[in-house]
Amino acid sequence: MSMKFSGQVALVTGAANGIGRATAQAFAAEGLKVVVSDVDAAGGEGTVELIRAAGGDAVFIRCNVTRDAEVKALMEGTLAAYGRLDYAFNNAGIEIEKGKLADGDEAEFDAIMGVNVKGVWLCMKHQIPLMLAQGAGAIVNTASVAGLGAAPKMSIYAASKHAVIGLTKSAAVEYAKKKVRVNAVCPAVIDTDMFRRAYEADPKKAEFVATMHPVGRIGKVEEIAAAVLYLCCDAAGFTTGHALAVDGGATAI
């Protein structure tokens, strides 16, 4: 299904692979110019190559979203490349936690919160003024089903995603009358390189994870990309401050 977009430029962070890459490709397939960003330059350039090979228009700008100066430079680079910013998918995130809350350490906490929360905050801090100047814009932040409930042995990660939803809802209300919409997408377990690395040594565990979703499988990156594009497109013009679960029914249980 083709979606209608009033704007023409989209930015995707964490776009070197997985959900970010799929979403960058989906934006490009709809005819938008795409700024691809990540700390992984090789992966980011690879995403750009895939988009261009399919006839799309994209550029890569490296950015560590935990650093204010780099995020500011990313927005300046976006303007230099395409002159505006209509849609932003703040997808950069990490997931390194594998133990109970009392077994975590400060470095792990700081790393997860730095990318998943500070990174989203910094991106919105610099994106929103550009959109206000244009008179409109749409932002989607990557949260998680872990931000909608509990996530045993992933308490810091869950807290970071609850925080992303809090940032999303607050920003949505603050800028609603200025025609800047802010939403979040909340995936369950998705078939990404990260998932494969985590479970390739234990196929039985991977099968168990799939059964956690009532649909009986894990999600596809293209399914998350479709949700992001919907939240950005004109058809979602009355949707803001929403955390959309794309989870195969997991949160319905």
Image (cartoon, rainbow, N blue to C red):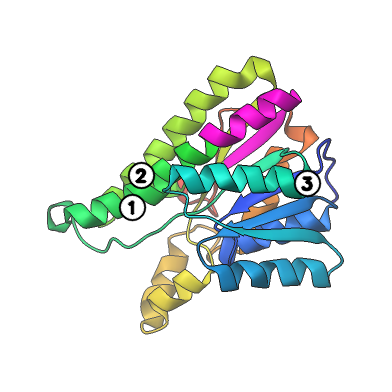
Front residue of 224 and 33: 33
Q: Element at badge 1?
A: helix
Tell me the mark number nearer the camera, choosing from 1 and 2. Answer: 1
Badge number at residue 160:
2
Q: Residue furthest bottom?
A: 201
In the rendered structure, the answer to whether residue 229 lies left or right of residue 118 reads right
Front residue of 81 and 26: 81
Kindly identify the residue that appears in the image at 38 percent across and 37 percent down. Answer: 163
Cα–Cα gap, marks 1 and 2:
7 Å
Packing grade of label 3 (10 A; few <14, some 14-19, many >=20) is some
Residue 11 visible at all: yes
- The rendered magenta stretch, by its main secondary structure, is classed as helix
Kindly identify the residue that appears in the image at 52 percent across and 63 percent down. Answer: 190
Q: In the rendering, at what x and y percent does residue 145 appear?
A: 44, 48
Tell me the mark number nearer the camera, choosing from 3 and 2. Answer: 3
In the rendered structure, the answer to whether residue 145 lies left or right of residue 112 reads right
Q: Residue furthest top?
A: 177
Badge number at residue 82:
3
